[in-house]
Amino acid sequence: MRLSVWEGTKQGVARDISTIARLAAKDLRLEIRSKAVTIATLFFSAIVLVILALAIGPEQQFLRNGAAGALWVALAFAGVTAASQSYQHELEDGAFEQLLLYPIGRATVFLGKLAANWCFMVLLAVILVPLCGALFGASFAQNPGLLASTIALGTLGFALIGTFYAALTANLRARESLLPVLMFPVVVPVLLAAVSATSEIVQSGNLTLARDWLRLLTGFDLIYLVLCTALYGVVVEE
């Protein structure tokens, strides 16, 4: 009896993981075909980095000190743009309502959307890191493992909040203006931890402190993951 329950649980988990992967792949395929959000966010992020570099000035030390903050500012604004469009195609075609009629859990839908948005932000970070390093004269190649962990955890936290609040505001007329207003107060702890850890890593500062910030970032991500997944079903049913 116990063995059959265990086998059934494993099959259910494998089925949910497969569904999440298919949902994420579907969203990524839509974006690859249209390229609208990708081009807009890349252009916008690059402009943000250039403006911040010009605003800080030519002093190399000041530029290096501001590199971590500039990177996460660009990622944050690009993440808002991506999140605001994550439900757009499906809402226009009525596909999202049909998706909710399928016999899959609301948490599975959320995790599929989250996986797509997270992948998008990680790929964006991969492009922006060398650009930011060139503009700000900062070396992001030091401690690549810590930097990769920081980017992965920071973008995960941002994607969690973005995916959840994009669903909350999806049917509102002023969703483009409401989404950042709702998101940024909640995502501040994630950005603070990500910027602090990145700054310590880039400037070869206190790596022990950077790891402490990473632990804090991991805690925020876990809390947001549990809360957003649990509340997503309530949000999309309203």
Image (cartoon, helix red, strand yellow):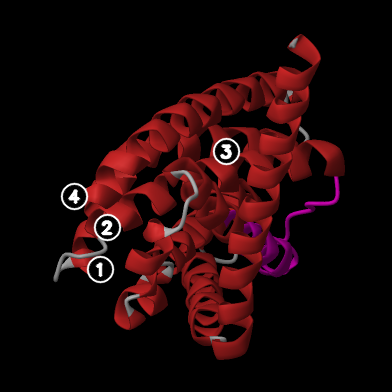
Q: Position of residue 233 (x, y in %)?
A: 34, 42
- CA neighbours of label 4 inside 10 A, class few (<14), some (14 to 19), many (20+): few
Q: Position of residue 145 (x, y in %)?
A: 84, 39
Judged by its main secondary structure, the magenta piece is helix
Q: Are marks 4 and 3 in contact (CB under 8 Å)?
A: no
Cα separation between marks 3 and 1 = 25 Å
- CA neighbours of label 3 inside 10 A, class few (<14), some (14 to 19), many (20+): many
Q: Are marks 2 and 1 in contact (CB under 8 Å)?
A: yes
Relative to residue 233, is residue 203 drawn left or right? right
Residue 69 versus residue 171: which sits nearer the camera?
A: 171
| Foreground label between 2 and 4 | 4
> What residue does disc 3 label?
194
Image height of 78 relative to 118, above or below: below
Q: In terms of secondary structure, where does tag 2 sit? A: helix
> What residue does disc 4 label?
238
Taking the spot 77% from the left edge, 45% from the top edge, the residue there is 148
Q: Position of residue 177 (x, y in %)?
A: 20, 65
Q: Which mark is residue 236?
A: none
> What residue does disc 1 label?
176
Identify residue type, mark 4: Glu
Taking the spot 50% from the left edge, 86% from the top edge, the residue there is 36
Q: Which mark is residue 179?
A: 2
Q: In terms of secondary structure, where does tag 4 sit? A: loop
Cα separation between marks 2 and 4 = 17 Å
Q: Are marks 1 and 4 in contact (CB under 8 Å)?
A: no
Who comes first in sequence, dot 4 or dot 3?
Answer: 3
Relative to residue 6, is residue 57 drawn left or right? left
